[in-house]
Image (cartoon, rainbow, N blue to C red):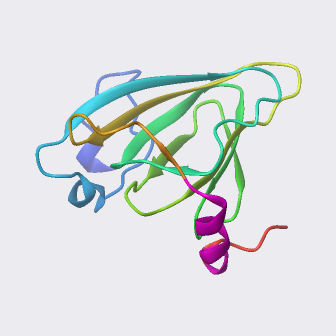
Amino acid sequence: MSSEHAHLPPGVEVLTTWPDAAELIPAGAEARSIRVTLQPGDPGAPPHRHPGPIFGYVAEGEILFELEGQAPRVLKAGDALFEPGGDVIHYQGANNLPDAQSQLVLTMFAVPGTPILTLVSAEELAERQHLRAPRP
């Protein structure tokens, strides 16, 4: 354990840190706690973006997770995640399990009154295809 976290009581664990993430929180933002439960095989929301950064973790199951510029990856229960929000497209947040539900617990920072997500049009996806990481 690093000396900066040596004071934590037993059972408390720092999963990860994102040193520059606070700079992405919009002025006047509110914090929103969100739970996403995906049934077996659920593909999740279509490509979209969020109005501000999201911090969270996989509480249960496995999530196939893909952000613009990053290769798709599988996050398992206990794994932490970060999305910068704003202009970055969230391509996938699917349940990777065909026979069990998966769940995310998230905190989003966004200006009050903004939607949790905004779908991205097929035209914009085509225009930004060059920003998507190559898929295996």
State the residue at coordinates (37%, 21%).
10
Query: Where in the figure is residue 103, as x and y percent of width and height?
Result: 61, 24
Answer above or below: position of 108 versus 16. Answer: above
State the residue at coordinates (29%, 23%).
9
Can residue 70 be seen?
Answer: no
Residue 4 falls within the magenta-colored stretch:
no
Residue in the foreground of this view, choosing between 81 and 88: 88
Instruction: Please identify the dominant SS of the magenta region.
Output: helix
Q: Quadrant of the N terminus?
A: top left
Residue in the foreground of this view, choosing between 65 and 57: 65
The magenta span reads 120-130
Residue 123 falls within the magenta-colored stretch:
yes
Q: Quadrant of residue 41?
A: top right
**How many numbered callouts?**
0
Single out the residue that lies furthest toward the bottom. 130
Query: Where in the figure is residue 43, as x and y percent of width and height?
Result: 75, 37
Residue in the foreground of this view, choosing between 102 and 123: 123
Can residue 108 be seen?
Answer: yes
Single out the residue that lies furthest toward the right. 98
Answer above or below: position of 21 versus 127. Answer: above
Query: Where in the figure is residue 54, as x and y percent of width and height?
Result: 40, 44
Q: Quadrant of residue 84?
A: bottom left
Q: Quadrant of the C terminus?
A: bottom right
Answer above or below: position of 111 versus 36. Answer: below
State the residue at coordinates (66%, 45%).
46
Query: Where in the figure is residue 30, as x and y percent of width and height?
Result: 20, 34
Q: Quadrant of residue 115?
A: top left
